[in-house]
Image (spheres, coloured by chain):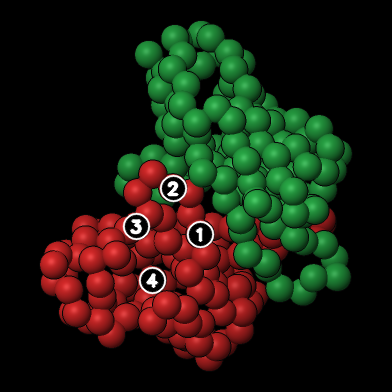
Amino acid sequence: NAGVTQTPKFQVLKTGQSMTLQCAQDMNHNSMYWYRQDPGMGLRLIYYSASEGTTDKGEVPNGYNVSRLNKREFSLRLESAAPSQTSVYFCASSESGATILKANVLTFGAGSRLTVL
Amino acid sequence: GNSVTQMEGPVTLSEEAFLTINCTYTATGYPSLFWYVQYPGEGLQLLLKATKADDKGSNKGFEATYRKETTSFHLEKGSVQVSDSAVYFCALSDPVSTSGTYKYIFGTGTRLKVLA
């Protein structure tokens, strides 16, 4: 089925460990996003990528790095995990571009629940 | 900057009750507005959207009207069901002028619980 696939679904880390969350979409979308969801905070944008080869910071980028490997894949890396990064992480994608005059719908993955001890 | 404010939850209703979840926004320009729904253990999925003033988005009995004069996009449903229990997020699109793409700004979410 077409959509956004995230791995892993669950991960437990110790403080200081590193890990990468993987995301892939098969809808030929240009734009991809990483959000984190925390109770009472809604969704906050970590990083986004307008197109292959470009990435930009969102609202809460500190402690994270991203790679837009190709048009399909957008990974999120935690180099040295901290308890404050315990959260549910969502990857999303959207069709976009200069010829699209109105924002299109975001398609979300199922989420990755990360716990940092 | 642009922002979205939605009512605090949780909202608890009996089946067949009328639902309103308030959402107001602050934005420059003319954003598109969205309601997303998140069922337990799942990602968010689009419920409805509106792209310009006075547009009404609707889906599955839910409706919301883009009100520019009051900067609001309130979600309504005439008769809720137990299956509507979920978290509802209001969101707006924020264009990134240099790239032709958009960022999406979300409210904090409102949890709805419908009792049989």
Q: Nearer the viewer, mark 2 or mark 3?
A: 2
Residue located at (38% from left, 62% from top): B88
Q: Residue furthest front?
A: A1
Position of A108 with respect to B39 (left or right) is right
Looking at marks 1 and 4 on the same chain, the residue that comes earlier in the sequence is marked by 4
Query: x%, y% of residue A26?
Result: 74, 48
Residue B45 is tagged as 1
Please tell me how crowded label 4 is: few (under 14), some (14-19), or many (20+) other residues with Cα within 10 Å.
Answer: many
Do residues under tags 4 and 2 come within 8 Å of each other at their CB atoms? Answer: no
Q: Nearer the viewer, mark 4 or mark 3?
A: 3
The vertical placement of A25 against A89, above or below, is below
Mark 3 falls within which chain?
Answer: B
Residue B42 is tagged as 2
User: Chain A appears what colour?
Assistant: green
The vertical placement of A115 against B31, above or below, is above
The residue labelled by disc 4 is: B23
Mark 4 falls within which chain?
Answer: B
Residue located at (51% from left, 16% from top): A81
Residue located at (38% from left, 54% from top): B39
**Alpha carbons under labels 1 and 4: distance apart:** 18 Å
Residue under disc 2 on the same chain as residue under disc 3: yes
The residue labelled by disc 3 is: B87
Residue under disc 4 on the same chain as residue under disc 3: yes
Q: Amino acid at mark 4?
A: Cys
The vertical placement of A111 against B26, above or below, is above
| Quarter occupied by the N terminus of chain B | bottom right
